[in-house]
Image (cartoon, rainbow, N blue to C red):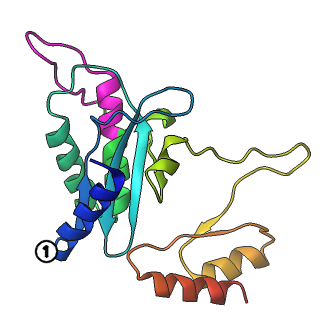
Amino acid sequence: RTPTAVEAAGAELLRTGCGAVLIKGGHTKAREASGAAVAQDYFCSADICCWLSSARVENENTHGTGCTLSACIAAFVAQGEPMLDAVVLAKAYVTRGIQLATRLGKGPGPVAHTGWPADAKAMPWITRTCDEGIVRTQFARCSDGAACGVVPIVDSVEGVQQVVSAGAKDVQLRVKNVPASTVLEMVSHAQE
């Protein structure tokens, strides 16, 4: 299927009343410019639609990946994570599990259950389009002489005002489970 067809299928499923849709694409043949294979999934909800990409792990021991993914998503949602965050964390867990999976008898072995993924390489990157996902997103490097350090993350306009008045030059406002219009309003107030 083409990325356009996948996106259309996601939109159609949302119209049936689903709260969110995740279309797995781990078996596709997408490749980074370096030639490395990429596993790309499509997530869509009323608030956001995006592609989640990660380095494809070449390992035939993938028995139970779908069940593990859905169980991880459910567990993260039960712990209060927003749906997209739950999907990202679950994808990282499964990617790490495939990296460490081994055969246990005949046929493909089960995905390894390893605990929280400690390897940043297991984390997927999020893009608006499938094509953008072919290139792994990188954090900007600090230039020579620039002050690099901790950026405060706050969840309210009041928090932004507090850390700015304490001397912070950069602040991340992170709010979850609110409409995009509310976030835009909060950002506008925080910039005043």
Q: Which residue is drawn at 44% across and 44% down?
A: 124
Provide the residue span drawn in magenta.
93-113
Q: Is residue 19 visible?
A: no
Dominant SS of magenta comes to loop
Question: Which residue in the rendered view is the most extreme toward the top?
Answer: 105
Q: Quadrant of residue 170?
A: bottom right
Indicate whether residue 95 is drawn in magenta: yes
| Relative to 149, residue 136 above or below | above
* Image x and y of residue 30, in percent: 40, 36
Looking at the picture, tell me which residue is in the foreground, 48 or 74: 48
Q: Image quadrant for the C terminus?
A: bottom right
Looking at the picture, tell me which residue is in the foreground, 171 or 44: 44
Q: Can residue 186 be seen in this view?
A: yes
- Residue 48 shown left or right of residue 45 in the figure: right
Question: Residue at label 1?
Answer: 16
Q: Which residue is drawn at 79% across and 68% down?
A: 169
Q: Which residue is drawn at 33% across and 48% down?
A: 41
Looking at the picture, tell me which residue is in the foreground, 192 or 23: 23
* Image x and y of residue 69, in percent: 22, 44
Indicate whether residue 104 is drawn in magenta: yes
- Residue 12 shown left or right of residue 38 in the figure: left
- Residue 78 shown left or right of residue 84 in the figure: left
Question: Which residue in the rendered view is the most extreme toward the right?
Answer: 145
- Residue 141 shown left or right of residue 26 in the figure: right
Question: Which residue in the rendered view is the most extreme toward the left?
Answer: 106
Badge 1 element: loop
Q: Quadrant of residue 144?
A: top right
* Image x and y of residue 38, in percent: 42, 35
Q: Residue at x 56, y 89 (%)?
A: 185
Number of other residues with Cα within 10 Å of mark 1, as a class: few under 14, some 14 to 19, many 20 or more: few
Which amino acid type is shown beneath numbered disc 1? Thr
* Image x and y of residue 4, in percent: 34, 58
